[in-house]
Amino acid sequence: MALPKPYVSPSQLNMYLRCPAQYKYRYIDNIILPPRSAITKGRAVHKGQEHNYRQKVETFQDLKLSEIQEVAAAEFETFAEETEWEKDEDPGKAKDEAISLTTLYHTEVSPQVQPVLVEEAVSVPLDSGYSIYGFIDVLDNQGYIRDTKTTARTPSASEADKSLQLTAYSLAYRELMGIPEKGVILDYLVQTKTPKVVSLKAKRTKRDIKRFLAIVGGVVEAINNDIFYPNPGNFMCNEKNCGYWKLCHADF
Ligand code: SF4
């Protein structure tokens, strides 16, 4: 699918809502920061999952764990070079954690999922001229839209209810298929002392989608009017977690 222009992706939308100044630095000024360790770990896990599911659409079989671990390890190595590691972070330990989460996903989640679509690009044109654009991780044969997250903390039970990303994919699914999906699922891989899976299931209604479109409309209007202000109240606003900290404190 050709990239629609202009577009807003679920992650862009979340970034604008979290901090409009951060959105401006990333998507208007195009200042791309090196990934942090959590992103690199998440990419590795995601790549292993994608490698397995792409073939499972046809074969209905999961690949051997060792192959998935190798794919995840290779992805980790590729991105480790460009990752911005904190002084107290050990890339070797981070790689072990990525493999451990990959193993967890492959042994506990993959056997329950028969994918129909994997990494499917979706685009929904809006009246504003923008499109909503993104990739559905997995659509399973039960009609569930699934997405995977890696995290250090156990997520709250409402995360799947609140996820704008899943609402965006629900909207895209309905545009594509002409019927509602069965539901949405967030599979969290939690990097606690003993790693665990937390799968959260939710539904989307027409009301949720209407509300989502109102949020997107507001964000697009603000972007078109160059409304970009700092939001120091957001959870990422500290020197460690926001790579734009110095720039932002010089500008505002
Ligand atoms: S430092 Fe805080 S307010 Fe500034 S861009 Fe980063 S998150 Fe936003």
Image: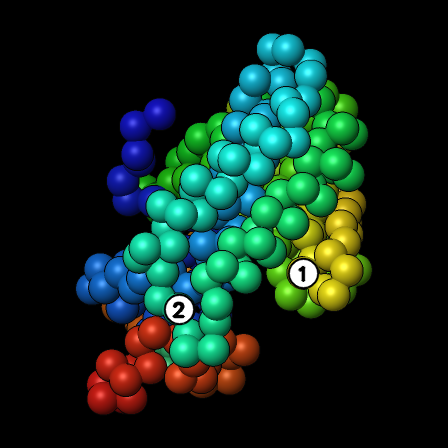
Q: Residues within 10 Å of mark 2 (few under 14, many from 20)?
A: some
Residue 168: % across, % down: 55, 44
At numbered mark 2, what does the secondary structure look like: helix, strand or loop? loop
Quadrant where the N terminus is found in the figure: top left
Asked if residue 87 is positioned above or below residue 31 in the image, the reply reads: below
Q: Is residue 170 visible?
A: yes
Asked if residue 163 is positioned above or below residue 131 in the image, the reply reads: below
Residue 174: % across, % down: 60, 29
Q: Residue 85, labelled with which disc? A: 2
Residue at coordinates 33% horizontally, 82% vertically from top-left? 245
Asked if residue 136 is positioned above or below residue 29 in the image, the reply reads: above
Q: Residues within 10 Å of mark 1 (few under 14, many from 20)?
A: some
Q: Residue 158, labelled with which disc? A: none
Q: Quadrant of residue 141?
A: top right
Q: Are marks 1 and 2 in contact (CB under 8 Å)?
A: no
Residue at coordinates 44% horizontally, 48% vertically from top-left? 76
